[in-house]
Image (cartoon, grey):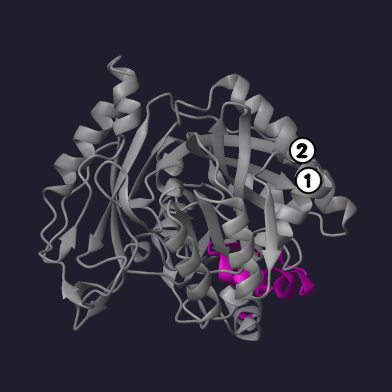
């Protein structure tokens, strides 16, 4: 098969690494890719916002299958444009991608189909949003409705924080994403990420993961796109997975089909496991980043047939096999992230990864032939092990061999799971 992968981040490097292992693959391209993805695929300098250019490339190279990694092209309708040309595509239509593209849309689906989630209201002006916040009290959560690259959510523990978050949204801190605001109840519990392939009718649960959103040790400081992750998530017991499927995923599949927008792709359900059980924080319509990195490390099955079955509506005919060994990834970010940071800082060398180890490139580029850091989150240092503690030790040992002066990381990724393992909790 001739396959094109869309995207350039750590998630896409993990997908490329796993897809390239498939014996079904004959030619593999990535647009625009990154220096890590270049180990596995031929990089194509396409502007992925130009859907006609992507379609023309697919026609020119007789591409059989397109895998869309990031959310922005899906929300913008790239999958629809390529399907119109008869291509098989992994990723939802623009209408179905509203589950991530509009937090208000998702909350409305939850309300209509009785899916457990925090109580909420939608607002298109600041004074009404602030009045609601004052009436409800804190803690409370303020979200920009649209895509804000993981930065449009404020978990406000004080009234001043909540009111400032409303101002940020309506004053343009997140561009058009903040033109509407969703204010919702604060859910108390433990977060988990749940992944499930869906072909519009059938669902195939994948593995669970847990990520660390906060920039600081002990899960303190501001929210980021994710500073590390591990899989599986201990809080997601067999009973909790079953309840998530029955109470959240299956009603969503039914609801999207009844709305005329059947969902085909991957559901990434951000969950809060509360005293009542699993509650939906938000949906994403692509693999998580950095959760994808630990999922791909644990996946024993060939990824390509699973994604093809999703695109062709035959998910009921395939299964996914997983390693029992946990996997853990640590994000190396540019100093200053998630605020301002220097770009194009030199990465002098990366370590040689052994079996069950991989350094995924998330925000790297080449400048005058040398590797440089181009983004906020730059490397995902990933390892598996017999326990979470062992996976953590292997990942940090690998990370300590990276020679990049402008990089920083958290040193406590996986702490909750390790406390469970050692019986301290």
Q: Is residue 270 above or below residue 63?
A: above
Q: From the viewer's perspective, is 111 left or right of 226?
A: right
Give the residue number, with chain letter if any, for mark 2: 250
- Near mark 2 (Cα within 10 A), the count class, few <14, some 14-19 or many ≥20, is some
Is residue 42 in view? yes
From the top left corner, tell me how far across and down residue 91 is, in percent: 66, 59
Give the residue number, with chain letter if any, for mark 1: 253
Residue located at (45% from left, 31% from top)? 233
Q: From the viewer's perspective, is 383 left or right of 84?
A: left
Q: 142 or 355, which is in the foreground? A: 142
Q: Is residue 329 above or below residue 247?
A: below
Q: From the viewer's perspective, is 416 left or right of 259?
A: left
Q: 419 or 48, which is in the foreground? A: 419
Residue extending furthest top? 423
**Magenta residues?**
60-88
Task: Check disc 2 and report its element: helix, strand or loop.
Answer: helix
Task: Check disc 1 and report its element: helix, strand or loop.
Answer: helix
From the top left corner, tell me how far across and down residue 196 is, in percent: 63, 41
Identify the mark at residue 108; answer none if there is no mark: none
Residue 89: image quadrant is bottom right
From the top left corner, tell me how far across and down residue 312 is, in percent: 76, 51
Q: 265 or 126, which is in the foreground? A: 126
Q: Count of labels shown?
A: 2
Residue 165 counted in the magenta span: no
Q: Name the image quarter holding the N terminus.
A: bottom right
Do the residues under discs 1 and 2 have CB atoms within 8 angstroms? yes
Residue located at (28% from left, 40% from top)? 413
Residue located at (56% from left, 62% from top)? 143
From the top left corner, tell me how far across and down residue 408 is, in percent: 18, 57
Q: Name the image quarter holding the C terminus.
A: top left
Q: 223 or 54, which is in the foreground? A: 223
Residue 72 counted in the magenta span: yes
């Amino acid at each position: 098969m001739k396959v094109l992968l869309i995207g350039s981040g750590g998630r896409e490097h993990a997908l490329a690494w796993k897809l390239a292992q498939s014996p079904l693959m004959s030619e593999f391209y990535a647009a625009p890719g990154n220096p890590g993805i270049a180990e596995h695929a031929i990089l194509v300098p396409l502007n992925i916002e130009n859907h006609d250019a992507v379609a023309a490339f697919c026609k020119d190279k007789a591409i059989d299958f397109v895998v869309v990694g990031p959310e922005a092209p899906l929300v913008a309708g790239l999958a629809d444009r390529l399907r119109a040309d008869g291509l098989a595509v992994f990723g939802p239509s623009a209408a179905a991608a509203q589950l991530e593209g509009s937090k208000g849309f998702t909350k409305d689906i939850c309300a209509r189909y009785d899916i457990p989630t925090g109580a909420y209201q939608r607002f298109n002006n600041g004074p009404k949003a602030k009045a609601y916040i004052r009436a409800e009290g804190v803690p409370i959560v303020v979200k920009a409705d649209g895509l804000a690259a993981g930065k449009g959510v404020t978990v406000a523990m004080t009234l001043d924080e909540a009111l400032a978050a409303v101002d940020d949204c309506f004053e343009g801190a997140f561009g058009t994403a903040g033109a509407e605001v969703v204010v919702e109840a604060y859910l108390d519990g433990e977060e988990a990420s749940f992944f499930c392939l869906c072909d519009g009718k059938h669902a195939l649960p994948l593995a669970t993961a847990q990520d660390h959103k906060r920039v600081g040790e002990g899960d303190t400081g501001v929210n980021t796109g994710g500073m590390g992750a591990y899989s599986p998530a201990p809080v997601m017991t067999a009973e909790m997975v079953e309840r998530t499927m029955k109470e959240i995923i299956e009603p969503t599949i039914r609801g999207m089909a009844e709305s005329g927008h059947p969902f085909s792709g991957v559901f990434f359900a951000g969950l809060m496991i509360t005293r009542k059980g699993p509650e939906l924080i938000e949906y994403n319509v692509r693999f998580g980043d950095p959760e994808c990195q630990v999922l791909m490390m644990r996946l024993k099955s060939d990824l390509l047939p699973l994604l093809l079955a999703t695109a062709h509506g035959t998910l009921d005919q395939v299964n996914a096999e997983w390693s029992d060994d946990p996997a853990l990834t640590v994000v190396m970010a540019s100093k200053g992230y998630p605020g301002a940071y220097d770009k194009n800082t030199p990465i002098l060398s990366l370590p040689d990864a052994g079996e069950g180890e991989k350094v995924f490139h998330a925000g790297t580029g080449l400048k005058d032939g040398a590797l440089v850091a181009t983004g906020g989150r730059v490397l995902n240092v990933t390892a598996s092990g017999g326990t979470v503690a062992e996976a953590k030790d292997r990942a940090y040992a690998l990370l300590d061999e990276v020679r990049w002066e402008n990089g920083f990381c958290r040193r406590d990724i996986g702490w909750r799971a390790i406390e469970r393992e050692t019986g301290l909790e």
